[in-house]
Image (tube, rainbow, N blue to C red):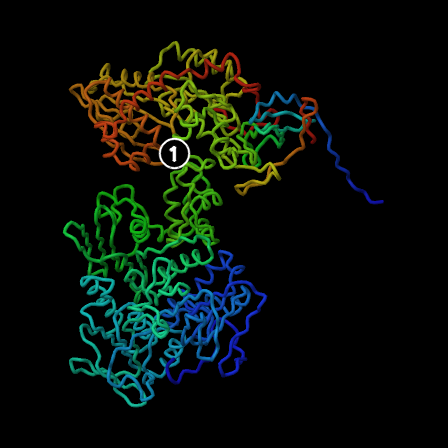
Amino acid sequence: MSLTELRTSTAYTVGRVEEVPPGEGRAFVAGGVQVAVFRLRDGSLHATQAACPHAGGPLADGQTDVDVLVCPLHLYAYRWSDGASTSGTAPVRLYPVRDVDGDLVVEV
Amino acid sequence: MGPGVAVSRVLGGRVMPPSPFHPTSFRLDVDEFDERASLVVVGNGMAGARFVEEVLERGGGEQFRITVLGEEPHGNYNRIMLSPVLAGESHEDDIVLNSHDWYADNGVTLRAGVRVERIDTAAKVVHAADGSVTAYDHLVLATGSYSFIPPMTGVRAADGELLPGVYGFRTIDETRAMLDAVGRCEKAVVMGGGLLGLEAARALQGHGLQVDLVHAMPHLMNVQLDAEAGAILKKSVESLGITVHLDVFATEVFGTGHVEGVGLADGRRIDADLLVVAAGVRPSTDLGVRSGLEVERGIVVDDQLRTDDPDVYAIGECAQHRGEVYGLVAPAWEHAKVLADVLTGTDPDAEYHGSRTATKLKVAGVDVAVMGINTPERDDDEFLVISEPKRGVHLSVVIRDDTLVGATLLGDTRKVAFLTQAFDRGAPLPEERIRLLVDLSDGAEEVGVAEMPGDSQVCNCNGVTKGAICAVVADGCTALGGVMDRTRAGKGCGSCKSLVKQIVEWAADGDLTEDPSASWYVPGIPMAKPELIAAIREQDLRSVSAVFAALAPAGKEDAKSKMGLTSLLKMLWGVDFVPEKDGEFINDRVHANIQRDGTFSVVPQMKGGVTTPAQLRRIADVAEKYEVPMVKVTGGQRIDLLGVRKEDLPAMWSDLGMPSGYAYGKSMRTVKTCVGSDFCRFGLGDSTQLGIDLESRFQGIESPAKMKLAVVGCPRNCAEAYVKDVGVVAVGNGKWEVHVGGAAGATVRKGDLLATVDSPEAVVTLAGRFMQYYRENANWLERTYDFVPRIGLEKIKQVLLEDSEGLVAELDANMQRSVDAYTDPWGQDGGEPSTPGQFRPSLPLIPLPEVPVR
């Protein structure tokens, strides 16, 4: 029997949906991990690591549209679809997030 | 092909298989199930092959069964590069453009080495010398030109072929034959002092031959250059060791069986064992004449390159359009594009309207660039000449109605990129015309982009070198916006943008892709600012999301457009603007300037840089209470509290009890002042009070980019008013100068004097009027130092001072509405956050990057 490390993700309720205004992001802590949660104008939810991979900028302070998140410090942009940077820097980590009866549930 | 030439090998491909065709007349079978129309191209030179490429690029491979008939047995090669091949600088393999395999890979039938004899336009077939008959639906003639051999006694042998040792200079086979001969020859005569003749002379001289150049006209390159420039070129050519004979033509070729010399009209004889005839080219129109097409100098075509037969077209050097026959590759390629648009239906109405020809070349080791006319033609044409015969430099420009209509650069082509732009696109010219030809050293000295080393850094913000920019262009990205996206060059402070643009233009060699988005106000809405403003007003769009829904493609929002739209809507609607926090940049959401570690800086308003002990005491108390890591006096005469946590902002504002200084916004920032007349012994006016009045009136006014103002009490300029967006200078007798468009940041520019007015009230009115004109007309993030030169000072003066467009009352009223809409954001959001969690920390847990505490 081989030894395989099983990585499991755990779901955490970090707050209420209405704590994130439409189009904006807010930072939360999910099981000791900092995450930035975004509620887009189309109602969809997204979560990323809280600090920008480029220079540690606060991603929750960034601007968004349906395709990308833009970091406020140097305007590097990251795609929601896969976390890749559109400007050639390292990708951002994405976390699954969902709305459970108005609770924001993030899996880390 | 000259006699005695052994065709060793087919250039650009495999050796042709023996012809499978029966020698008598036959019809090439076509697949009867192939429903594609037959497109036949006669001529496989630079025009014909490019045309095929353009058709394929437009998906024409689906529409057409394409057949190319070429007289030469080779693939398609770059004829312009024959000179370096003759000079031994390039290998013939390097000049192949499309190999035989390329045609096969793209489903194009190439029948190389086949000469077309006749077109039967009624039956829509072409007859070739090999007996084949090829049917066409559309026929394109791209037969090019041939070397003109002037009548000379003895130039041809009895069989009508050129005497051995006499060569034209047009094909790879002729070039090979000359290369084969140079080892056996000692003396060469080149006939023709045009571009091709000079290049042949230089190449042969490089092979160790003694070269005499005979030119029938009074100066070299007489088609492109004026007499003076021609004389300078002659000196440069002679300094290479080439003997030049002008204003005389050859009448006779001596030698039986092989050339031995030439006789000139003045009776002289020049011995030679090699004669190159480069006395010009003539369009190859025989096929057109034989087939009954209308032929004058070339095959006559209309604006869609159509001959007088509706299914037969002609492009390139064999075509005559609106009386012009071109001998350059650029027009041929334009023909190819237009015709491909028409035939593939990509743009059935595409038209060709003639070419403005600009050439840049190196002839006989001398750089030459020529465009348009070379001498003034009308009385009021401006003509500027710089001639330095000793250095071999001759530069001239011809300007008509403020537009460049011609330029000649000989020996120094550093300014060619700018001139080509001005010539092709009618770009505005500098008022000092001499700047068209030389860079004047006045502190803003520019190094020509061509001379910059590849590793020199262009964008200092993002560390992008010239080499990195060129690499992206070489990779096929020729739009400025695309290059900036991929390299991030010009995306920092933006001060290098124009240099980046120049490098892209240079690297793309003029083949720049127009960036339609360059004229848009923001990237996500395809409209220029005036159009956008009109649409917003007309459709009554008062929020950022409403603008996206109504005006963006598919109603799609765009993160990078939100800030610019918020600014524009605030300016247009004032109190009626419907704010949306996600439309604002973080600085505007929390009314403070974000720092590298996610903390913020707090700058209270300090009008005119004047403060009081009570204010200072309060600032000191707040700094201590909130453990502010750094307190710093700013360049704008205020006090900055740096390193403030986001969650502390509202409490700090409340404790300070001072309004926001707007040190974070794209808005009116501050008005610096000197101590003026109250204390200064030189002061001519009360600059301090006027500065305070200006700041009180225009506080927090949002604008396309930040606006920094200053007022000084005398021209000693202690508060640097000459380098401000709006700078006011007291000049005595109650008079004030208003300067606009100054800058002392990444760009340094002295402001332009807009007007001298005679009261502080008039200063406030004029400054407001200028700022409103700027707010309504500048592009997003365009500072006044770019805006003023772009619009032109004269125009701005007419609009603002003479009311030439009847706008003044409206500008004043619009500014007044913005002034009335002002509220202090710190007072507004301090008590009650405008959104949930407005001041919540965004980086709560990780240790912040350490900014040293002093």
Looking at the image, the residue that sits furthest to the right is A1
The relative height of residue B513 versus residue B664 in the rendered view (above or below) is below
Point out residue A24 in the picture as x, y percentages from the top left corner: 56, 26
Point out residue A10 in the picture as x, y percentages from the top left corner: 73, 30
**Residue B699 vs residue B476: left or right?**
left
The count of marks equals: 1
- Residue B594 appears in view: no
Residue beneath disc 1: B531
Classed neighbour count for the residue bearing mark 1: other residues with Cα under 10 Å, few (<14), some (14–19), many (≥20): few
- Decide which of A47, B597 is in the foreground and name it: A47
The relative height of residue B386 versus residue B39 in the rendered view (above or below) is above
Looking at the image, the residue that sits furthest to the top is B614
Q: Mark 1 lies on which chain?
A: B
Q: In which quarter of the image is the N terminus of chain B?
A: bottom left
**Residue B645 vs residue B175: left or right?**
right
| Among the 4 quarters of the image, the one containing residue A47 | top right
- Residue B583 appears in view: yes
Point out residue B807 in the picture as x, y percentages from the top left corner: 28, 26
Q: Which amino acid does label 1 sit on?
A: Glu
**Residue B401 vs residue B812: left or right?**
left
Looking at the image, the residue that sits furthest to the left is B379
- Decide which of A54, B61 is in the foreground and name it: B61
Point out residue B10 in the picture as x, y percentages from the top left corner: 48, 75
* Helix, strand or loop status at disc 1: helix
